[in-house]
Amino acid sequence: MRAADEEGMRRAGRPLLPAVLGVAVAGALAALTADVLRRGLLHRLDWRLHLQVDAHVHDGPVQTVAMVLSLVGQRGIVVVPLLVLAVLAARRHHSLRPVIVAVGALVGIALLVLLFKAAVGRVAPSSGHDGVHAGGSSYPSGHAINAIVCWGLVLELAASLGGRARWVLGPLRRRLATAGLAALAGLSMIVLDYHWLSDVLAGWLLGVLVLGIVLAAAPVRARPVSSAARPGSARPVPSG
């Protein structure tokens, strides 16, 4: 009974963890935005990094590579695999839920980015000065948000199709792949001098928050498969 009670308590506590993490991420985003608006510590760090990029990164191989990597967060590009996989998942699971969640995520991040950009009005580093409420649209980085939300959902939908993809794209691998793609998209924006560092940080935080909500909505709910059903696993031999 004691073991059963402990297992029940663990299961009851699991839903609290995403909520606690969500509150922590939202708090970090609020603190970051407040720091940008009052031109605090991150303002000085943003400016120093911008000066380094402006002094040492010019037209050449580095900018070419950064331009290519920035496509990872380009909405017009990432939306294609997202919608294709949403349709495939809808057919696989005989439900419109994957398509509805994918479209809802795209609309949600578009609205959030527009609201933040309008509220902060920060100008891009390429302008030569760091101003807020100046009619700019630098904060937050849309590329950073797109990379996290869209690729996170793409990998989730791909894993839901079953087969080997489900085991190759395990939960940890999906998170690591999403983080890597988001890092490439965000850092390329800094190297290209399109966004301040804090713009990218805000984009990552907002992306994590939105992706957490999307995954909580569960675009698909596949039934658990026993370990015996995994590819390559041996069938149990009956005793006697």
Image (cartoon, rainbow, N blue to C red):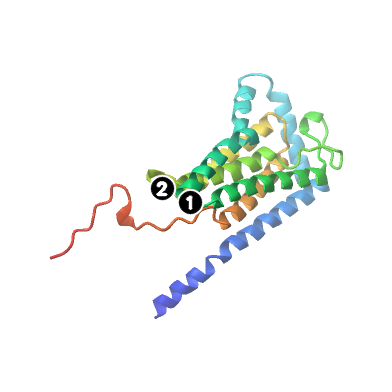
Q: Nearer the viewer, residue 211 or 131?
A: 211
The image shows residue 212 at horizontal and vertical percentages of: 60, 54
User: Up-down: is 58 above or below 124?
Assistant: above
Residue 123 picture quarter: top right
Q: Name the residue located 70 percent from the left edge and 46 percent from the top edge.
A: 202
Q: Position of residue 98 (x, y in %)?
A: 55, 49
Does residue 36 appear left or right of residue 10 in this picture?
right
Where is residue 47? Give x, y as percent: 77, 36
Q: CA distance from mark 2 to mark 1?
A: 14 Å
Q: Indicate the position of residue 226 as horizontal and vertical percent values.
A: 34, 58
At x 76%, y 43%, the residue is 114
Q: Which mark is residue 94?
A: 1
Compared to 91, does 26 lie above or below? Answer: below
Q: Nearer the viewer, mark 2 or mark 1?
A: 1
Question: Would you call the spot at circle 1 few (<14 residues within 10 Å), some (14-19), or many (20 or more)?
Answer: few
Tags 2 and 1 touching, CB below 8 Å: no
